[in-house]
């Protein structure tokens, strides 16, 4: 039976995207070298491209790739004359499988181990992102380079250096100890959210968004939630990304210009993604037993915006309190500025202006490019709401509306990105 080559290529690509994480994770457990594991997996892909046009596509392409890659791993172990006892065990396990279409028996935690390995703190943040998209997303170096608007050579070098670093530092293929789980999990979530933010508010190029990266981050987040179902921050990150992604269709105008959150047509928000976000937030609350973490607080802010039927109906008092809690555990410049905006919306522009002015004394924030915009909005709001004293003897506040574009859309420059590139969450949820 002859199968058309384009059809085979599409099938192999689809199988690789779906199964690459499991295949590479299973092989890494066998050979204890993620670089070698990916090479063996790629050998299996090459074999599929050579054999399937002639033999036909198997009923279970992913299992075929896994079995073929495992055979190559066993051959490698035999050739290198290492781990003789393990060779026999692996060969025996392979013989127990019922043909090339049998379901692989990878350990349930293998993929989770691969997640922690690719996001290990010994790697620079950009290398973690590239390696994660390569090993867990199944993306090619060319696809990753297009997503981040760098050359394929740059991505290839990042991935190669990351693998070399993991090997040289002898980073084990194992789950972190319980006392280090929170720290390591934070590194993983940081990478996933970095990928999402790079797609949601691109830091280079002419497009505001790169939907492919958003979708990949959502897929990784959902996978992580399945692998670590008892971790509230994982579910909270998924909730945050689902709700933010729900606004994608409303975030740009007809000519591609950014549309601030309060001006968006909420009828264009994706209700399915919002419901998914709400469900993930419920899971975060059900699994969380202690103080909420940064992703839980940010997801709660996103929920407030999603629940409001209109911009005027936003519960700014609740959002201000959430930002106060968030600023205590994640005092990044953008979080503190967003708190000032939220306080101004909840308690009047003067309250927001007072808080924004207090940030001028901070050496980090004094030259921050968004601070003048926030102060300007609060100042204009304060001036507009202050009138000659009435019979009651006090200023008469006017109706408050969300901050206008100059603070965020008009001042949205590429220099706003270091905090995202450093993995610090806090892109302004009040903007878009």
Image (cartoon, grey):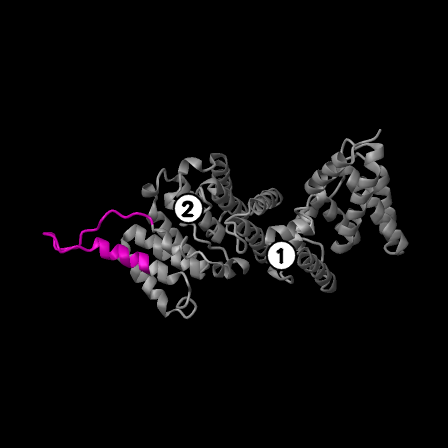
Task: Choose between 126 and 283: the one closer to the eye.
Answer: 126
* Lateral position of residue 297 relative to residue 394, left or right: right
Q: Measured along the vertical axis of the image, is residue 219 above or below residue 344?
A: above
For the point 75% across and 36% down, which residue is it? 6
* Alpha carbons under labels 2 and 1: distance apart: 27 Å
Residue 344 in the image: state x and y as whole percent. 31, 54
Q: State the predominant SS element of the stretch in magenta.
A: loop
Please check the rendered image and state whether residue 44 is part of the magenta-colored stretch, yes or no: no
* Residue 99 in sight: no
On-image quarter of the N terminus: top right
Residue 271 in the image: state x and y as whole percent. 47, 35
**Tag 1 secondary structure:** loop
Residue 3 in the image: state x and y as whole percent. 80, 31
**Tag 2 secondary structure:** loop
Q: Residue 129 sits in which quadrant?
A: bottom right
Point out the stretch of residues depicted in magenta.
376-402
Other residues around mark 2 within 10 Å, as few (<14) / some (14–19) / many (≥20): some
* Residue 207 in sight: yes
Other residues around mark 1 within 10 Å, as few (<14) / some (14–19) / many (≥20): few
Q: Residue 423 sits in which quadrant?
A: bottom right
Task: Choose between 252 and 81: the one closer to the eye.
Answer: 252
Considering every residue shown, the one lying at the far left of the view is 391
Task: Choose between 335 and 386: the one closer to the eye.
Answer: 386
Give the numbered dot on residue 259.
2
Mark 2 or mark 1: which comes first in sequence?
A: 1
* Lateral position of residue 82 relative to residue 394, left or right: right
Q: Residue 16 sits in which quadrant?
A: top right
Please check the rendered image and state whether residue 392 is part of the magenta-colored stretch, yes or no: yes
Tell me the residue that label 1 is attached to: 150
């Amino acid at each position: 039976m002859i199968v058309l080559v384009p059809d085979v290529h599409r099938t192999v690509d689809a199988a690789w995207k779906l199964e690459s994480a499991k295949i590479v994770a299973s092989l890494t457990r066998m050979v204890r070298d993620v670089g070698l594991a990916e090479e063996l997996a790629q050998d299996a892909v090459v074999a599929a491209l050579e054999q399937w046009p002639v033999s036909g596509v198997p009923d279970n392409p992913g299992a075929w790739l896994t079995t073929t890659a495992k055979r190559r791993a066993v051959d490698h172990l035999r050739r290198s004359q290492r781990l003789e006892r393990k060779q026999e065990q692996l060969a025996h396990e392979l013989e127990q499988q019922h043909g090339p279409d049998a379901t692989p028996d990878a350990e349930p935690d293998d993929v989770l181990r691969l997640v922690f390995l690719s996001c290990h703190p010994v790697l620079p943040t950009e290398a973690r992102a590239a390696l994660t998209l390569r090993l867990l997303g199944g993306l090619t170096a060319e696809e990753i380079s297009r997503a981040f608007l760098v050359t394929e050579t740059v991505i290839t070098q990042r991935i190669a250096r990351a693998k070399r670093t993991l090997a040289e530092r002898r980073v084990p293929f194992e789950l972190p100890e319980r006392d280090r789980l929170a720290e390591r999990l934070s590194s993983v979530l940081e990478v996933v959210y970095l990928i999402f933010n790079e797609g949601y508010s691109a830091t280079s190029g002419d497009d505001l968004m790169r939907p492919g990266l958003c979708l990949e981050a959502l897929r990784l987040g959902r996978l992580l939630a399945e692998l670590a179902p008892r971790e509230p921050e994982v579910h909270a990150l998924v909730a945050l990304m689902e709700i933010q992604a729900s606004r994608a269709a409303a975030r740009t105008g007809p000519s591609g210009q950014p549309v601030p959150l309060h001006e968006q047509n909420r009828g264009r928000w994706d209700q399915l993604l919002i419901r998914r976000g709400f469900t993930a937030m419920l899971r975060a609350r059900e699994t969380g037993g202690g103080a909420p973490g940064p992703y839980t607080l940010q997801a709660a802010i996103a929920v407030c915006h999603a629940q409001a039927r209109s911009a005027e109906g936003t519960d700014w008092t609740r959002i201000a309190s959430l930002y106060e809690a968030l600023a205590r555990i994640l005092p990044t410049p953008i979080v503190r500025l967003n708190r000032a905006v939220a306080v101004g919306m909840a308690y009047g522009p003067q309250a927001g202006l007072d808080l924004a002015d207090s940030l001028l004394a901070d050496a980090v924030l004094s030259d921050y490019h968004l601070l003048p915009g926030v102060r300007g909005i609060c100042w204009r709001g304060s001036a507009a709401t202050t009138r000659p004293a009435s019979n009651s003897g006090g200023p008469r506040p006017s109706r408050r509306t969300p901050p206008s574009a100059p603070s965020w859309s008009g001042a949205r420059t590429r220099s706003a990105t270091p905090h995202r590139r450093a993995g610090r969450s806090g892109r302004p949820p009040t903007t878009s």
